[in-house]
Image (cartoon, helix red, strand yellow):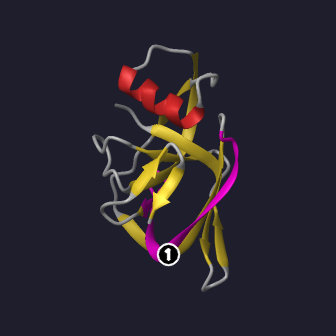
Amino acid sequence: MSILVKGDDVQLVDSAKEETINIPPSYVLCHDTSGHYMPRCHFYLLNYQLEGCMDCEYNADLMDTARAYYGDSMKFEKGAIAVPRGPWQGLGAIDAIRYRRRGFRSGHYEHVFLQGVRVQECAKPHGYRILLPDGCVANERGFVKP
């Protein structure tokens, strides 16, 4: 399994403080749906570098997951991310995430978390991490629980 890009054009919202963190435009929302490389309920916002390979050879499990998320007609591109190992600094909690999806469910989405979820930032390589509680559900429909 590999890491799936779930979206881009991301904003993290803290309604209580009336603050929005606008994530840099080159960053994408990443998720390891298998939990093999990253904890399954951690979502990363990382700089994405396109490697220029259209319709490359991919692992069958990854393709099944990607097609469920993006649809059968989506052209897939291979890219690279640098996953920070830490140290991570707490930024506080957010109560919503806004992001853009591509594929057959394309559009701008907002998911409101019923309870705030923690966000952390790492300086080198730069990235953000959203820590959802164990038992979270995120699938082809997007964020489902919490």
Residue 140, can we see it? Answer: yes
Instruction: Identify whether 15 is placed above or below 122.
Output: below
Task: In the displayed orientation, state which residue is furthest to the left.
Answer: 36
47 and 101: which is toward the camera? 101
Secondary structure at badge 1 equals strand
- Identify the residue at horizontal 65%, vertical 77% (top origin): 19
Give, as a three-letter code, the residue at label 1. Leu
Predominant secondary structure, magenta span: strand
Q: Quadrant of the C terminus?
A: bottom left
49 and 115: which is toward the camera? 115
Which span is picked out in magenta? 105-130
Q: Is residue 129 left or right of residue 5?
A: left
3 and 140: which is toward the camera? 140
In the rendered image, which residue does mark 1 sit on? Answer: 114
Q: Quadrant of residue 43?
A: bottom left
- Identify the residue at horizontal 54%, vertical 44% (top origin): 6
Q: Is residue 7 left or right of residue 88?
A: right
Residue 3 is situated, as x and y percent measured from the top left of the image, at 42, 37
Query: Is 128 part of what is drawn in magenta?
Result: yes
Residue 79, can we see it? Answer: no
Q: Is residue 33 left or right of residue 47?
A: left
- Estimate how packed mark 1 is, as few (under 14), some (14 to 19) or many (20 or more) residues with alpha carbons within 10 Å: few
Residue 101 is situated, as x and y percent measured from the top left of the image, at 64, 44
Residue 73 is situated, as x and y percent measured from the top left of the image, at 64, 22
- Identify the residue at horizontal 46%, vertical 77% (top origin): 115
Q: Quadrant of the N terminus?
A: top left
